[in-house]
């Protein structure tokens, strides 16, 4: 009787468990950027996002993770990177990968967040960087301006701020645009 009941019963899997998203919250940008490296090295899928204002704890970055991997994420971070907590995402995440591209006659400006990178269309030479107010931007300016896009050091490796991360995204997009134009 019980076996018959089990056979005829339809099992409804929990909706959304396989792709339930969560946010790991940090107090500093440097912690969030370091945690991304730690989790990726551990083979865990994650990416930096802007958390909703209600979850911000002094940092404008969080890591979006798969909540199914929460225990593995906690283990990977414990003792390596301090984090505030892990919270379920409710779809209110702000994307960080929004770039605006403005072409000029000989140059292209790529804006990511509050950072702008301008490069020469023909040579790929970085001619200007502007925006942001983070303390590492003058250092990054000195390292990047006058360098070709494909030879430029990665701002996210040299800097420790949200401005450096946004400049890195602008550099990625600029390199993509320049390579695509060169191949046509």
Image (cartoon, grey):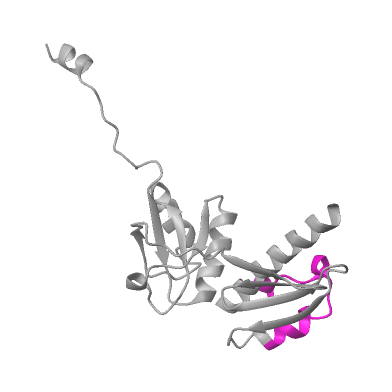
Q: Look at 55% across and 76% down and name the residue there.
A: 162
Residues 103 and 57: in front is 103
> Which image quarter: residue 4?
top left
Q: Quick check: 140 left or right of 97?
A: right
67 over 122 or under it: above or below:
above
Give the image location of residue 169, x and y in percent. Answer: 64, 67
32 within the magenta span: no
Give the image location of residue 101, x and y in percent. Answer: 66, 68
85 over 138 or under it: above or below:
above
Q: Look at 63% across and 73% down and name the residue there.
A: 111
Q: Magenta stretch: give its range.
A: 138-161
170 over 17 or under it: above or below:
below
Q: Is residue 61 visible?
A: yes
> Which image quarter: residue 62?
bottom left
Q: Look at 84% across and 80% down and name the residue there.
A: 146
123 over 139 or under it: above or below:
above
Residues 31 and 175: in front is 175
Q: Look at 34% across and 70% down and name the residue there.
A: 55
Give the image location of residue 59, x and y in percent. Answer: 44, 76
Q: Is residue 161 visible?
A: no
């Amino acid at each position: 009787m019980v076996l018959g009941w089990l056979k005829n019963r339809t099992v409804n899997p929990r909706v959304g468990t396989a792709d339930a998203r969560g946010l790991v919250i940090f107090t500093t940008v440097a912690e969030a950027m370091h945690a991304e490296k730690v989790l990726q090295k551990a083979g865990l899928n994650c990416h930096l996002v802007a958390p909703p204002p209600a979850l911000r704890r002094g940092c404008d970055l969080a890591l979006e993770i798969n909540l199914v991997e929460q225990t593995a994420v906690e283990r990977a971070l414990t003792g390596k990177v301090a984090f505030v907590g892990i919270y379920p995402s409710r779809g209110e995440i702000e994307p960080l990968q929004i770039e605006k591209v403005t072409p000029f006659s000989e140059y292209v400006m790529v804006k990511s967040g509050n950072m702008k990178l301008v490069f020469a269309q023909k040579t790929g030479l970085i001619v200007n960087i502007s925006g942001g107010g983070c303390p590492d931007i003058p250092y990054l300016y000195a390292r990047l301006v006058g360098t070709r896009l494909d030879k430029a050091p990665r701002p996210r490796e040299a800097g420790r701020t949200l401005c450096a991360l946004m400049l890195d995204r602008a550099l990625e997009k600029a390199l993509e645009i320049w390579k695509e134009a060169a191949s046509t």
